[in-house]
Image (spheres, rainbow, N blue to C red):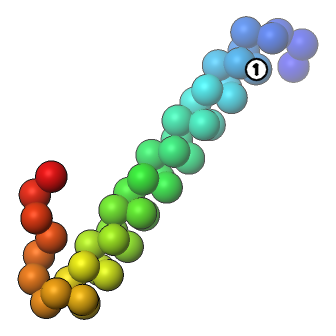
Amino acid sequence: MDNDLAKRLMWTGLLAGTGAVVSIVANRLATIIWVRLFDEDPPDA
């Protein structure tokens, strides 16, 4: 892989993909914690 543009595009895709997964996991974890603490669904943001 000598093409810098391809490397940058791959890096951007990898960063966006991992960011999306982490965001989904954080949202689910926060929802689980909220429900266990307050025994109700979290408020809509």
The kind of secondary structure element at disc 1 is helix
Furthest-front residue in this view:
38
Tell me if residue 30 comes above or below residue 11 in the rendering: below
Give the x, y percent position of residue 41.
11, 76
Query: Is 7 in front, or is 38?
Result: 38
* Residue 35 in the image, given as x and y percentages of width and height: 20, 83
As drawn, the residue found furthest toward the right would be: 2
Up the image or down, 27 lies above or below 21; here it is below
Q: Is residue 31 left or right of residue 19?
A: left
Is 45 situated left or right of 36 in this image?
A: left
Mark 1: amino acid: Lys
Q: Position of residue 16 (x, y in %)?
A: 52, 35
Residue that label 1 marks: 7
Question: Along the line of sight, which residue is nearer the eye, 10 or 32?
Answer: 32
Q: Residues within 10 Å of mark 1 (few under 14, many from 20)?
A: few
- Which residue is located at x 37 percent, y 73 percent? 29
* Residue located 25% across and 79% down the image: 34
Residue 45 location (% of width, % of height): 15, 52
Tell me where residue 33 sits by quadrant. bottom left
Q: Is residue 16 above or below residue 32?
A: above
